[in-house]
Amino acid sequence: MQLATLYNNINQQGMSAIRNHQEQLDRNLLNPDKDMWRGLTLTASLPAHVSRNIMFCLQKLAAIEPNQYFYPPADLHITIIDLIAASSDFSLSTFEEEKYKNVIGPIISQVGSIHWRLAGMITSSGALLVKGYYSAELSTLRNTLRKELPLHDLLLKERYPTISGHVTVARYTSPIQQADRFLKTLEGFKSINFGQFTTSSLDLVVHDWYNHNSRLISKLSLGS
């Protein structure tokens, strides 16, 4: 499936869910201090100019639906791959963390920098997403990790094998009160250009689902 088709399908389903008052609500965000879900993830950060452009749009949506959860700029990220999807029983020793780092580092160094273009904001049934389009290096890296990690006896437990390159920027925590106005405003952002950038390093982190509580294990450099 091509990215454009994937994102369009997500958006159509999301808009339908909102119009029919069938949003998927994230109740964990109502009590964030009690959220103990953690996972091991490879992430890419966003440059300041891209985050700034995203926040400009989020402020307009937050003015309409202030009770939803909007990501702070520091938490915005792109998930390269969920190595171990977040769960309430996540546990990883220091030795295991080092093994992941020592295996993943050389793999990443053999893959070139990843080029990104972020353009357009859409909704799923439970979240707002910024559409990300990427160079072939990301697909190469994901496929190599999926092949190599099991060969080194390292657990690979993705929620699902994704081809997406999106940024989650908000989650729904309560029913949307002004659906028509919200969706009309969002429609105005469907083609907006948030910026282009190149990722030359990735972060190996233990974090929660929202990247709010994040611990950096290592910053790993991509090849030139």
Image (cartoon, helix red, strand yellow):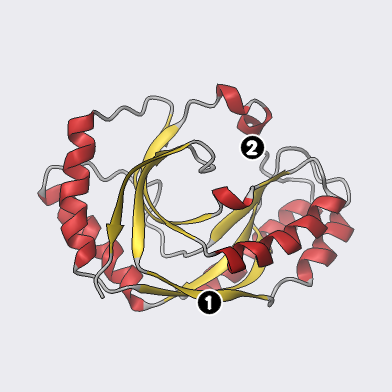
Secondary element under disc 1, as helix, strand or loop, is: strand
* Labels in figure, total: 2
In this rendering, the label closer to the viewer, 1 or 2: 1
Residue at the spot 68% in from the left edge and 39% down from the top edge:
25
Nearest the eye: 73 or 15: 73
Report the disc number at residue 60.
none
Residue 197 spot, x, y in % from top left: 48, 74
The quadrant of the rendering that contains the C terminus is bottom left
The residue pinned by badge 2 equals: 26
- Identity, as a three-letter code, of the amino acid under mark 1: Gln
**Badge 1 or badge 2: first in the primary sequence:** 2
Tell me the number on the disc at residue 196. Answer: 1
Does the image show residue 172? yes
Type of residue at label 2?
Asp
Q: Compared with residue 219, is residue 39 higher up or lower down, i.e. above or below?
A: above
Q: Which residue ends up furthest to the front in the rendered image?
A: 48
Using residue 50 as the reference point, say whether residue 101 is left or right of it: left
Label 1 environment density (alpha carbons within 10 Å; few <14, some 14–19, many ≥20): some
Residue occupying image coordinates x 23% and y 37%: 97
In this rendering, position of residue 91 left or right of residue 60? left
Q: Is residue 81 left or right of residue 184?
A: left
